Image (cartoon, helix red, strand yellow):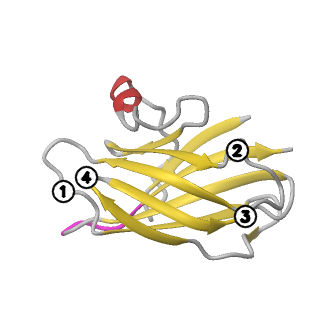
Amino acid sequence: MIRSLAWAPAIAGLCGAGAAAAACGDALPAAARLQAEATGWQLAFAPRPAPLAVGRPFALDIVVCPPAGQPLPATLKVDAEMPAHRHGMNYRASVKPLGSGRWQAEGLMFHMPGRWRVLFDLDRPGQPPLRLASELDLP
C-alpha cells in the first residue's frame, strides 16, 4: 500500500494528487513512480532498482514541479522514517541536482519491513521550507 502525504513545516495536512500531478515526472518509469503534492508543489520519484526490498541499497530519481511562476528549489534533502517505530534510516542520502528540476538521491536503504515515510525537504528561494512525503509499506 502506498499513500502520499504532504505538509509544510507547520503541518498543513493531507493533500491529494490533482490532474496536473500526473504530468510531473512522466519521464520516470510508470510502474515504479510515486508522487507527493503540497500547496501546488508536486514531486515524482522512482526507486532504482525497483521494486524496493529490505536490506538492499537503492537510489531515487526525483522530479520537482513547482507551481506556475515559482522557481525551482535551491536544495533538496531526502530522508525516510518509520512513523510506527519512531526511527529513521541508518543511512544518510546524498542528493545531487541534475538540472531542470531533476535530482538524484543515492545511498538509501530500508533496513526493516513495515511502513516507511519518504521525506523530501525543499529549500525554496524567498519562501519557508516545504516538506513533501510519501508513505509506502515494505513487505
Look at label 1 and name its amino acid: Pro
Q: CA distance from mark 1 to mark 4?
A: 11 Å
Residue of label 4: 100
Give the mark nearer the N terminus: 1 vs 4: 1
In space, the residues marked 1 and 3 are separated at their CA atoms by 31 Å
Q: Are marks 3 and 2 in contact (CB under 8 Å)?
A: no
The answer to whether the residue labelled 2 contacts the one labelled 1, judged by CB atoms less than 8 Å apart, is: no
Residue at image position (55%, 55%) is 60
- The three-letter code of the residue at mark 4 reads Ser
- In-front residue for pair 14/123: 123
Q: Nearer the viewer, mark 3 or mark 2?
A: 3
Q: In the rendered structure, which disc, 4 or 3, sits on the residue that comes first in sequence?
A: 4
- Of badges 1 and 3, the one in the foreground is 3
Task: Please state the extent of the stretch shown in magenta in the rendering.
Answer: 126-130
Would you say residue 127 sits in the magenta stretch?
yes
Residue 13 at x, y percent in the picture: 50, 47
Report which residue position mark 1 lands on. 71
User: Which residue corresponds to mark 3?
Assistant: 109
Figure check: 79 above or below 3: below
Instruction: Determine whether the residue tagged by mark 2 lies in a helix, strand or loop.
Output: strand
Say few, some or many: other residues with alpha carbon within 10 Å of mark 1 (under 14 / 14 to 19 / 20 or more). Answer: few
